[in-house]
Image: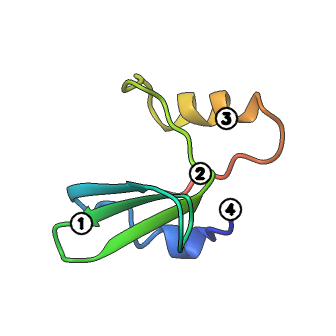
Amino acid sequence: MNLRPEFLKQVIGKTIAGIVTREGVGAGPHFQLFVIFTDNTYLEFYGDIDWSTHLESGDVETVKQYASRFGGTAVVVT
C-alpha cells in the first residue's frame, strides 16, 4: 500500500458521509472500497481487500501495537 503520511494527513479530522463498496469480475479491480467525506472528497482502496466483520475498541496506540505484531513498520499519522 503506497499511502504516504503527508497524503494521509489530509484525511485526519474529516467526517465520513458514506461508504461505497464494489466486488465483481470484469474491468477494474476485484474489490473497491470508497470512503466519502462530507466535503465531497473520497478515498479509494482497491485490490485484495479484507476487513473485520465488527468494530474493534482501541485508541491510536492500541491499534499501532496490534498492527506491529504482524511485522513491518506501523506508521501513525495524526
Real-space Cα separation, disc 2 to disc 4, in angstroms:
14 Å
Q: Is residue 53 above or below residue 14?
A: above
Instruction: Tell me the amino acid under the disc marked 2.
Output: Val
Contact, mark 4 vs mark 3 (Cβ under 8 Å)? no
Residue at the spot x=76%, y=27% of the render? 69
Pick whichever, 70 or 76, lies toward us: 70
Real-space Cα separation, disc 4 to disc 3, in angstroms:
14 Å
Between disc 2 and disc 4, whose residue precedes? 4
Element type where label 4 sits in the image: loop
Element type where label 2 sits in the image: loop
Real-space Cα separation, disc 1 to disc 2, in angstroms:
21 Å
What residue is disc 1 on?
37
Q: Position of residue 75 (x, y in %)?
A: 66, 52
Chosen colour scheme:
rainbow
Real-space Cα separation, disc 3 to disc 1, in angstroms:
25 Å
Contact, mark 1 vs mark 2 (Cβ under 8 Å)? no
Q: Residues within 10 Å of mark 3 (few under 14, many from 20)?
A: some
Residue at the spot x=55%, y=27% of the render? 62
